[in-house]
Amino acid sequence: MPDRLPGALVSLGRSLRLGYRAEPRLLIVGFVTTVAAAAPDALLALALSALVAAVVGHEDRAVLAASLSLGLLVTVGWLLSLASERVNVRLTDRAAVFIESHMARLHIEVPTIEHHERLDYVDRLTLLRDQAATLSELYQMLFSEIGAVLRLVITIAILISVRPVLGLLGLFAIPPVLASHWRAGAERRTEEAVAVHERLARSLFLLGTTADAAKEARVGQVQPMLVRRSAAERLARYRAMARARMITATWVSLGYVCFGAALVAGVGLAASGKDAAAKVVLLLAAGSRLSQYVSQTVRETHLFRSIWLDGSRRLAWLEDYAHAHTPAVDATVPVVLRDGITLEHVSFRYPGTERQVLTDISLKLPAGRVVAIVGENGAGKSTLIKLLCGFYQPTSGRITIDGVDLQAVDIRAWRSTLTGAFQDFVKFEYPLAEAVGIGDLSRLADAAAITAALRKAGADNLVASLGNGLGSQLGASWPDGVELSHGQWQKIALARGFMPEQPLMVVLDEPTSAFDAQAEQEMFDRYAVAAAESARTGQITVLVSHRFSTVRMADLIVVLDGAHVAEAGSHADLMARGGSYAELFAIQAAGYAHTTASEVGSAGG
């Protein structure tokens, strides 16, 4: 994100258009009142000088006129400032809602999840999320900045009217303003460089203070370590920022020293000649106001530049990113799968890394079949699921749906035909019916469909155990909420995946990791029957499991090993082949038999 003024102004313009779309009338009124309030404030020095000249000259009418002018300027300035403040508060509140919704839409529009997992993107997004609330104040700050510049212009014009050479005071106001502009950019670059420390410190803090990690943190007694590491990360950020701020503050201070010396010299020049008293008062009033305006301009320039302008630039980056990752498409998603999904020489490595997670994968997932993907941890099973769902695009090769390249179809339309459950499922703390029903928003209020999905997930007893049935509030942190075990949460996630009626692909990525072997087998047996009934739509079920015994029912079993497809075939074929699948199946079967025998022996003893 290079520090270039033209790019910053383009980003600012785009943010201003957002504000205009949010509330055009308030934006215009806020601009007019805020900028107009600057004029009476700057003209006070002129009215005060006229009053002194009238008093010294014993001109009663002039004294009255100057007094009325002074009172009028104060009153008008106060009224405009009050109107500006009220209007800008309303504009800020309205813009906050609009900008937050806009950012949420941008996140939704990006079809991939790369920006959630790449370190450099995550750091930018963290800073942008932190600035989301303050971005709504961008308009008020910009108007104040313009008003401050107008005050400077009027004040310098007044000084020139006293003695042209005094206009040079405006030139001496430039160094602190330029130093402030540079200061904001330098501190922003440092802030982005150390954002990883802030993010890590926040993560460590949450680990030590939230319920999810509370038990393990206390049993392991790691809270002191979490506190130390969090403090160390924040201290690392603090030291880097403090060093940058010290350097930039030194240069800004030098700019103020230059301006102060010029102001003292100007007072000496004004204290001579005709109407010296009025000129000195004018210079003192205007000069002191000039000092105040320069200070205000520098402060607002720094805040505007370091917070709001940088925030608008990060927002523009997210807009550009979302636009760039929404490709033009010309193919439609099929209503029924007739051939299936084909991977043609697909390779993939995560952006910013060199390691191939998948290498030259050529594979056919037949329509109307259950496909199981097995392999050791790190073999690329979940990555393959991400590619099939369109969360990432292959580094090379392509994925086709009934012969049509996945990148040629609207990825959102493709995802509307998908369903399933993932191993890193979300615990939606809603009433039970909602927590399941959001798996298919069109049937969110269909109690029968929700009950059927819960039954398919093996969660019948869960509904019966809750006091309010489908209306039971989930999550102990809510009024009348109930806390569930990890396995119960997983059953709800699984039921959510069973809500859509006729999906083209069902993805089950370790959906029963919290189940025991028997419960998992029973669930998959039930699902195998349901999958057979859905075969008429060409539905493909992709099942990822670490238990080989539960994937025997799959029509096709794919064994991943070292980023490659080691074997593929039915259970019978792979067992007859005697390869890695047969070996691992035998190992797991022996271990399960030993565990069962031990449990029986313990029960008998």
Image (cartoon, rainbow, N blue to C red):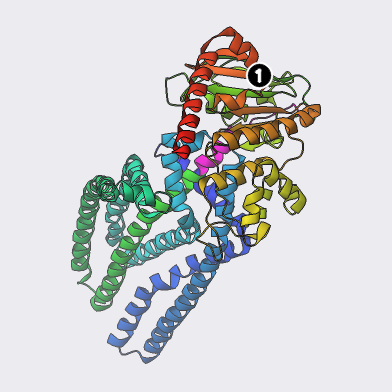
| 568, 589: nearer the viewer | 589
- 158 part of magenta stretch: no
Label count reads 1
Specify the farthest residue to the front.
605
Q: Would you place residue 124 above or below residue 366 in this image?
A: below
| 24, 397: nearer the viewer | 397
Q: Would you place residue 502 above or below residue 174 in this image?
A: above
Identify the residue position indicated by label 1 in the image.
556
| 4, 207: nearer the viewer | 207
Q: Callout 1, which amino acid?
A: Leu
Residue 589 lies, in percent from the top left, at 52, 23
Task: Name the quadrant of the C terminus.
Answer: top left
Residue 260 lies, in percent from the top left, at 21, 61
Quick check: can you spot residue 372? yes
Residue 156 lies, in percent from the top left, at 35, 62
Q: Is residue 477 left or right of residue 247?
A: right
Give the image quarter of residue 161: bottom left
Task: Name the quadrant of the N terminus.
Answer: top left
Q: Secondary structure at mark 1?
A: strand
Q: Which residues are magenta?
A: 316-332
Give the image quarter of residue 25: bottom right
| 332, 211: nearer the viewer | 211
Residue 259 lies, in percent from the top left, at 23, 58
Quick check: can you spot residue 181? no
Mark 1 nearby-residue class (10 Å; few <14, some 14–19, many ≥20) = many
Residue drawn 28% across and 64% down? Answer: 291
- 317 part of magenta stretch: yes
Residue drawn 49% across and 34% down? Answer: 600
Specify the farthest residue to the top.
577
Residue drawn 57% across and 12% down? Answer: 567
